[in-house]
């Protein structure tokens, strides 16, 4: 009996083998997690902590997750903001035509709050090296998105990539998708993203055709009751008050180049069918006049470009135009073409642009176009 007790004491002193196994497993797990976290922080595929490492083949395809890091840590003096209407701008064009070192921070389907979220980071002084100012912000405005709520975003954002709380960064540094798809996969099959053309749409040339657009388009049912002409301006005013104008006012040394994209004529068929032509015209007018009143804002109007919008071969769907028109708009920015005049200046104002837009819509034969389906 005494001998058994001695053996038991020896075994106890050696330690419980199950306990040792568990402790060993925990140590290995913690070490592996620490290693993964260190690798993610070092490579930083979402640029959350630092600028890109020279030579690493970064894959950039996630607007929600990678835009905030690019806004904070990339080297740039100008920015392209907006929805999918802006994804086919190439930043090299802005350097070629205007000498600007531009970054693209588009959000597909962007609401004004999406612009506000990223401008918070862009204009944070901690992210501006040596106090450098942003020279220009090119902001595409989709008027319908300005009729939503001031806190509304197109998609939920990963807030841990937008805030300063290091404790919730665990969702980033221990993220399986980040490790596999944004570190290991690029290392195994290097194909680095060309940041000049980042987020470009997937449509190839054959998709830009009337046949394709009409095939995928469904005309809405006719709405009998007309939308009140002022129905959208209240929401637009609130969105400008909260999500756009504070950044314009707080950064007088930055020039904001605001532009309305040229949707195809089918967009206006939707407007007519849904019976909100007057309300749509008024929200265009309100936003244009409100923003053009700022000294550091230029406003450009492209929706009434008849030769573009009435030819569906220029589009891949009812609103998305061929990349050549992104190039065209860049050239217009450089040449100050289709810019609204300031008060007291000569030139074609928003009322004239909208009158021309109305003329195009009212004379267009939508029935004949849709009969080609």
Image: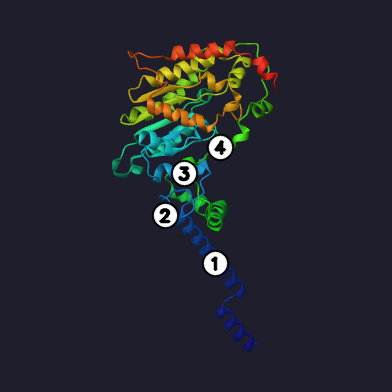
Dividing the picture into quarters, in which one does residue 22 lie?
A: bottom right
Counting residues from the N terminus, which is met first, the one under dot 3 or under dot 1? Answer: 1
In depth, the one of 137 and 31 nearer the eye is 137
Q: Which residue is mark 4?
A: 201
- Secondary structure of residue under mark 4: loop
Residue 162, visible in the rendered structure: no
- Depth check, mark 3 against mark 1: the one in front is 3
- Secondary structure of residue under mark 3: helix
- Secondary structure of residue under mark 2: loop
Counting residues from the N terminus, which is met first, the one under dot 2 or under dot 4? Answer: 2
Q: Which residue is mark 1?
A: 28
Counting residues from the N terminus, which is met first, the one under dot 4 or under dot 3? Answer: 3
- Secondary structure of residue under mark 1: helix
Q: Which residue is mark 2?
A: 54
Q: Which residue is mark 3?
A: 195
Say left or right for 291 vs 370.
Answer: left
Is the N terminus in the top left, top right, bottom left or bottom right quadrant? bottom right
């Amino acid at each position: 009996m005494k001998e058994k007790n001695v053996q038991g004491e020896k075994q106890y002193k050696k330690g419980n083998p199950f306990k040792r196994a568990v402790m060993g497993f925990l140590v290995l797990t913690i070490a592996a997690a620490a290693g993964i976290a260190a690798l993610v922080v070092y490579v930083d595929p979402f640029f959350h902590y630092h600028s890109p490492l020279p030579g690493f083949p970064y894959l950039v395809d996630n607007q929600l997750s990678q835009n905030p890091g690019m806004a904070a840590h990339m080297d740039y003096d100008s920015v392209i903001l907006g929805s999918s209407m802006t994804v086919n701008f190439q930043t090299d064009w802005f350097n070629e035509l205007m000498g600007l070192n531009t970054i693209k921070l588009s959000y597909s389907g962007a609401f004004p709050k999406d612009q506000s979220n990223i401008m918070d980071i862009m204009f944070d002084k901690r992210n501006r090296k040596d106090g450098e100012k942003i020279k220009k912000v090119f902001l595409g405005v989709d008027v319908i998105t300005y009729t939503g709520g001031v806190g509304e975003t197109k998609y939920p954002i990963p807030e841990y990539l937008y805030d300063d709380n290091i404790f919730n960064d665990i969702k980033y540094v221990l993220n399986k998708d980040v490790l596999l798809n944004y570190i290991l996969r690029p290392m195994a099959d290097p194909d680095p993203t060309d940041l000049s053309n980042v987020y470009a749409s997937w449509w190839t040339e054959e998709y830009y055709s009337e046949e394709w657009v009409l095939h995928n388009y469904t005309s809405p049912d006719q709405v009998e009751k007309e939308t009140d002409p002022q129905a959208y301006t209240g929401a637009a005013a609130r969105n400008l008050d909260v999500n756009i104008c504070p950044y314009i006012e707080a950064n007088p040394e930055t020039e904001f180049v605001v532009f309305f994209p040229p949707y195809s004529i089918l967009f206006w068929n939707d407007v007519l069918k849904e019976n909100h032509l007057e309300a749509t015209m008024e929200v265009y007018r309100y936003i244009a006049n409100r923003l053009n009143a700022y000294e550091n804002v230029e406003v450009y109007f492209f929706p009434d470009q008849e030769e573009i919008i009435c030819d569906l071969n220029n589009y891949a769907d009812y609103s998305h135009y061929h990349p050549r028109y992104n190039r065209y708009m860049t050239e217009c920015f450089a040449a100050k073409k289709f810019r609204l005049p300031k008060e007291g200046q000569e030139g074609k104002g928003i009322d004239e642009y909208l009158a021309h837009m109305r003329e195009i819509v009212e004379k267009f034969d939508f029935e004949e176009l849709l009969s080609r389906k």
